[in-house]
Amino acid sequence: MVTGVGSKHGIRVLEGDRTVVGVAFRPGGFRPFLGRPVATITDRQLPAAEIFDDIPTEPTVEAVEAMLRRRRPEPDPRAEEAADLVATIAAKPEITRVDELGRPVRQLQRLFADYVGINPKWVIRRYRLHEVTERLAKGATIDWAGLAAELGYADQAHFVRDFTKMFGESPTHYAQRY
């Protein structure tokens, strides 16, 4: 099964006694294998056989790695560009808006749809919201309204909505576990 980027919180329960091998591609890295925009599989699952015609009968890490190496595509500069932009977003907490990436917003939206599978605004929010969870894990006391403003939200309600959509619970409920 191939699973696209999930745009919201989800839980998947695996049942039975079959083997599961997971492969996580870096941002931009799956587009050359898929052969179409990654956004076409966002929030979707499809059988791996729709993409790969040589799936190993015994899905071990080694067998899956060998299959991917045989199909390794030529370097794609746009895939590298997408990966670099996501890395920049992850590394720079001060980036809270797409226009702060120094490129035309529409150009970034197309690149991200094609190579990442989700829009750059979502990626920025994802990393900023994960910073919140890291602060909570360290025991930080949170001023929710101030934090919402720091993260680029117009108000606390929008922050709470996005956090809940991403993590499946409100920030205060999440914080209670820390």
Image (tube, rainbow, N blue to C red):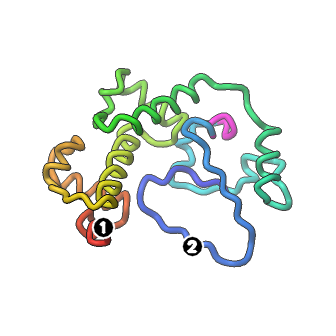
161 and 170: which is toward the camera: 170
Q: Percent position (x, y) of residue 150?
A: 20, 43
Under circle 2, the secondary element is loop
Under circle 1, the secondary element is helix
* Left or right of 96, for residue 52: right
* Left or right of 64, for residue 2: left
Q: CA distance from mark 1 to mark 2?
A: 21 Å
User: Which label is found at residue 13?
Assistant: 2
Task: Say which residue label 1 marks.
Answer: 174
Does the magenta portion include 31? yes
Rendered view: 78 above or below 38:
above
- Mark 1 against mark 2, which lies toward the viewer? 1
- Tell me the magenta residue range: 30-35
Rendered view: 151 above or below 18:
above
User: Which label is found at residue 16?
Assistant: none
Q: Residue at x 86, y 60 (%)?
A: 57
Q: Percent position (x, y) of residue 73?
A: 73, 31
